[in-house]
Image (spheres, rainbow, N blue to C red):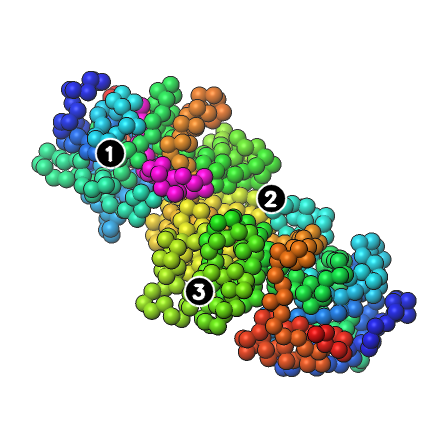
Amino acid sequence: MDDKSSSETRGNPIRCRAAVSRKPGEPLVIEEVMVAPPMAHEVRIRIICTSLCHSDITFWKLKDFPGIFPRILGHEAIGVVESVGEDVDEVSEGDTVIPTFMPDCGDCVDCRSKKSNLCSKLPFKVSPWMPRHETSRFTDLKGEVLYHFLFVSSFSEYTVVDVAHVTKIDPSIAPNRACLLSCGVSTGVGAAWRTANVEKGSTVVIFGLGSIGLAVAEGARLCGATKIIGVDLNPDKFENGKKFGVTDFVNSGNCGDKSVSQVINEMTDGGADYCFECVGMASLVHEAYACCRKGWGKTIVLGVDKPGSKLSLSSFEVLHSGKSLMGSLFGGLKAKSDIPILLKKYLDKELQLDEFVTHEVRFDDINKAFDLLIEGNCLRCVIWMDKQVSS
Amino acid sequence: MESNNKSETAGKVLRCKAAISRIPGEPLVIEDIEVDPPQAWEIRIKIICTSLCHTDITFWKMKAGPAAVFPRIFGHEAVGVVESVGDHVEEFTVGDTVLPVFLPNCKECSDCKSQKSNICSIFENNFSPEMPRDGTSRFKDMNGEILHHFLWVSSFTEYTVVDVTHAVKITPEIPVDKACLLGCGVSTGIGAAWKVAEVEEGSMVAIFGLGPVGLAVAEGARQRGALKIIAVDLNPEKFDIGKKFGVTDFVNPETCGEKSVSEVIKELTNGGADYCFECIGLASLMQEAFLSSRKGWGKTVILGVEMHGAQVTLNPYEFLRGRSVIGSLFGGIKPKSDIPVFAKKYLDNELRLDEFISHELSFQDINKAFELHQEGKSLRCIIWMDR
């Protein structure tokens, strides 16, 4: 189903194609679905392109709640507003927008504070529904409900998103670059820039050189960090990492008798100013904490470990070291104000985005994106909704 | 010995009285001891008064393990006058009023030079019970047996020797019994509120443990205009004392019913406190304090000394939600620069110290201070050496 004129479809359900995840861990099925018109405070979007993020894979595989099926996954995307529901003033039909899993209502105590990006009005949670009315806008052709994912559900030609989850952007930016700021790259860059507030001349360590870790490196580089140490099990990631500002590499599988933190403490003469955990393993958070510098070192938790995992710190070390342990979602960014700032930095050639896109596929081949990410040789695979893949 | 004249006692071994702890957990014994003259970069101090801190008690009770070191001269919160100085000492002269402190401040390492840290590197990882530079003791009993130092201060004695990095010069204008309090507990609490947490006007603060450190946090938070200061303690009597220091709400964990302390605090603060302070030293309370902090920006400050090697177990999900944890020794205070500032604030009536003193004793009754502390009946008990 190609581009429809909004006047035809406004107010009516749209029949279009979506990649539906019907069973945990099994290939998505491209089928026709019905997308209801947006309710109050909602926006219906025609997706231009979307990219696969590790969190999609996590929930795709999850058999028990909050895994839920059948579901339309995808949460990193860019699109054009097809129609808006009542009480929507912020965006209009034809606007280019980035949907985000993080809400930004602009109005609650958190949204108005510089210190937080965790909107209280529409708190983030892993929900199968739309945030305000807790219902779904998707049904399959049998009339069965299809569940939403992270309030975005971008593996569909059309989706409906709450206006708090929509950021209007400059349409001139290449969509297969802008979509990256919808999740992963923003999380990493934001973590360095906003959460940690990396200072010029700092030493930074990054555990895990996937897209998030590389985005942290990029953010740290932008902030003026002079030593950026990447830690990963895969030595191929170093060459890649250099493009994003990584200056030194530690292969965590190759430290011999020493722990990774010991190696890093030696390399940095006592520990780094900032350590980022970008994998999602409690044991790595412990390593990160162990190699951040006493006195002022900050350890930042970004990776999401499985439910029930615990961090265990020695209370003696906590007391005596003066180190801080912190974390954030979405890199501490406020979507509506910070995404445009990052896009401008991209246009001004300060922020790199191009290197994150390693593969591009057509919507029909969406399952290839899953294979590529799982195999581990992919950073971001962009999925184009149009029949033509833009080259 | 009241002499300011350098020639009389300088360079000589001094004989004086000290309260020696010979057997863990048993009363201190006041005996004559010998105190060596200060070596290079050391000063010898005549103690005027000293106070008992929970950390003295913790180590006094230790029966086994590397931290159990006896016979020992305890005490680390005190004020005195410089009796003589060793070679290379330029910062202090005979007659100066000084506070010996457990935390070094060399002023030369990158931590001392940075605004962001108070963890001086000079004697890093040195947990020796003796003098920091050469690892030997300056104390002997009358049988010639070595007496161990404590926290590089050892103030339960008429004379002690400390390294110059462990001494702070202060104005003689401040009454000595108030100055003495700035050597540990009170400064820790005030510093934690002012420097580590940076409590702002309108903040909501939760304090776990209303001993002198917790009360000092309350005082520091009140000074900064905190809107709500919630204290958590098992002893309801502490509320009355707490109110004097700015505590606005009191939570007794035993009367929370089915709710956890963190649930009660979240209700009182409409989602969680901006700053939570743990001032006891129990991993379980550190965890509870963390859970009581607000998403988005809630900061938990750990001040209590956990002595059982227990791990603090925290949920990573809470960190992703914007919470943070930081520990701090001595409330982030840089002794040589910050203690004189606190002394001045006291003199300018911007900082209250008098209310921390609940008892006063003479040196010979020092064991009474331990009893009062164990019974939970004292805040700070000032022990006067000359009375």
Q: Is residue A173 left or right of residue B318?
A: right
Q: Residues within 10 Å of mark 2 (few under 14, many from 20)?
A: many
**Residue sitting farthest toward the left:** B143
- The x, y position of residue B316, in whole percent, is 51, 59
Q: Which residue is mark 3?
A: A249
> In the rendered image of this protein, does residue A31 appear above or below residue B125?
below
- The x, y position of residue B31, in whole percent, is 16, 31
Q: Which residues are magenta?
A: B97-118
Query: Can marks 2 and 3 be said to lie on one chain?
Result: no
Q: Is residue B262 left or right of residue A30?
A: left
Q: Which residue is mark 2?
A: B269
Point 76% across, 69% down: residue: A47
Q: How many marks?
A: 3
Q: Is residue A10 magenta?
A: no
Q: Nearer the viewer, residue A80 or B21?
A: A80
Q: Is residue B105 magenta?
A: yes
Q: Nearer the viewer, residue A48 or A35?
A: A48
Magenta-colored segment: predominant secondary structure: loop
Chain ID of residue with mark 2: B
Q: Amino acid at mark 2?
A: Thr
Query: Of discs 2 and 1, which sits in the foreground?
Result: 1
Q: Quadrant of the N terminus of chain A?
A: bottom right
> In the rendered image of this protein, does residue B231 appear above or below residue B33?
below
Chain ID of residue with mark 3: A
**Residue sitting farthest toward the front:** A349
- The x, y position of residue B279, in whole percent, is 43, 42
Q: Which residue is mark 1?
A: B41
